[in-house]
């Protein structure tokens, strides 16, 4: 009996020892897994923190870049205004100190007085309105005829080969040489001024737009034909949409050329408009009127160019 009891005790002690070993191994395994998971979590957290830091650095750099651009724009605008104000101040001082002949070069004060006199009489606004109307009509005709001519030449390349030397010759011809003929043919009227302004810009517009149409991506054109499209589909889906930046840049150039052509026409065949004011002022030695008209033309050109830029930004934003 004693031996059997001892055997049972040894057996139970061995079993308890095995259970303890299993429990210890399980605890060690759990602790090991917990350590590994803790290390992984620390690595993930470190990666996330590094990613967040990099994103914060990028956002901060972007904010600094935007601020720099804004400050640069403000500085450029201030410098432009200071430069313009300094020019007029120096001009007035030079006129008062008789460094320059005030009769020939006038002065800002005299030009301001002339502006007030013409505004009170209502003449200046009338002349500005006439010049703007002629410029807009000429510009519309130049762009319409230029785009239509470029499309026609693109549709028929044989026609372009025939007309190319004549278009280049007419584009290079000084348009003031045509003015006497236009006056004889069309008379001394607004129609003559508009035709003269159109002749200044229309040939260059047609040639530049045709060059842009021809230099389009050939792969896009082949894709349209592969999908069963025709030449009209290529024109409306590839050529015209792809050349919107070129059309806008051509508009910028032709708007200024239209204004130049209108002033040339008003020099020769007009009794109203800013060009007429320039000729009239030079004839009666009112050089303050002449310089005032030139400054107004500068302002008009600046405003019209700014309008085209705003249109270009809106169109580019809508396409994006």
Image (cartoon, grey):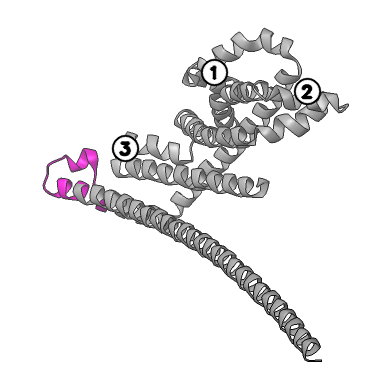
> At which x and y percent is residue 133?
57, 43
Under circle 1, the secondary element is helix
> Would you say 33 lies left or right of 131 here?
right
Regarding residue 138, the answer to whether it shows in the image is: no
> Would you say 121 lies left or right of 133 here?
left
What span is colored magenta in the figure? 91-109
Q: Earlier in the sequence, mark 1 or mark 3?
A: 1
Q: Nearer the viewer, residue 178 or 52?
A: 52
> At which x and y percent is residue 17?
69, 79
Foreground mark, 3 or 2?
A: 2
Q: Which mark is residue 284?
A: 3
Q: Residue furthest right?
A: 228
Q: Nearer the viewer, residue 34 or 213?
A: 34
Q: Earlier in the sequence, mark 2 or mark 1?
A: 1
Q: Which mark is residue 222?
A: 2
* Residue beneath the point at 55% across and 49% down: 310
Under circle 3, the secondary element is loop
> Does the residue at mark 3 contact the one at mark 2 (Cβ under 8 Å)?
no
> At which x and y percent is residue 181?
54, 17
Q: Is residue 106 magenta?
A: yes
What's the distance in space between the residues labelled 1 and 3, CA to CA?
35 Å
> Does the residue at mark 1 contact the one at mark 3 (Cβ under 8 Å)?
no
Q: Which mark is residue 171?
A: 1
Foreground mark, 1 or 3?
A: 1
Q: How many labels, in total?
A: 3
Q: Which mark is residue 179?
A: none
Q: Is residue 273 magenta?
A: no
Q: In what quadrant of the picture does the N terminus appear?
A: bottom right
């Amino acid at each position: 009996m004693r031996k059997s009891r001892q055997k049972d005790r040894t057996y139970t002690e061995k079993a308890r020892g095995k259970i303890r070993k299993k429990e210890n191994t399980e605890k060690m395994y759990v602790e090991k897994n917990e350590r590994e998971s803790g290390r992984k979590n620390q690595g993930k957290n470190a990666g996330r923190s590094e990613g967040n830091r990099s994103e914060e650095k990028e956002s901060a750099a972007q904010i600094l870049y935007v601020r720099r651009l804004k400050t640069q724009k403000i500085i450029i605008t201030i410098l432009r205004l200071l430069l313009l104000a300094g020019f007029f101040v120096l001009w007035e001082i030079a006129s008062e100190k008789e460094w320059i002949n005030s009769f020939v070069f006038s002065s800002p004060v005299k030009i301001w007085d002339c502006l007030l006199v013409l505004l009170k009489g209502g003449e200046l606004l009338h002349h500005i309105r006439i010049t703007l109307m002629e410029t807009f009509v000429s510009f519309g005709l130049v762009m319409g005829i230029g785009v239509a001519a470029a499309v026609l030449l693109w549709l028929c390349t044989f026609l372009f080969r025939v007309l190319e030397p004549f278009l280049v010759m007419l584009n290079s011809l000084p348009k003031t040489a045509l003015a006497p003929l236009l006056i004889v043919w069309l008379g001394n009227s607004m129609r003559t001024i508009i035709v003269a302004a159109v002749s200044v810009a229309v040939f260059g517009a047609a040639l530049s737009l045709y060059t842009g149409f021809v230099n389009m991506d050939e792969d896009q054109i082949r894709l349209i034909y592969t999908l069963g499209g025709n030449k009209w589909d290529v024109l409306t889906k590839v050529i015209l949409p792809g050349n919107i930046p070129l059309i806008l840049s051509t508009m910028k150039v032709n708007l200024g050329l239209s204004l130049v052509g209108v002033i040339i026409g008003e020099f020769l065949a007009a009794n109203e408009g800013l060009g007429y004011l320039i000729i009239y002022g030079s004839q009666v030695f009112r050089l303050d009127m002449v310089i005032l008209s030139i400054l107004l033309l500068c302002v008009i050109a600046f405003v019209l160019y700014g309008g085209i830029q705003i249109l270009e930004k809106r169109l580019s934003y809508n396409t994006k």
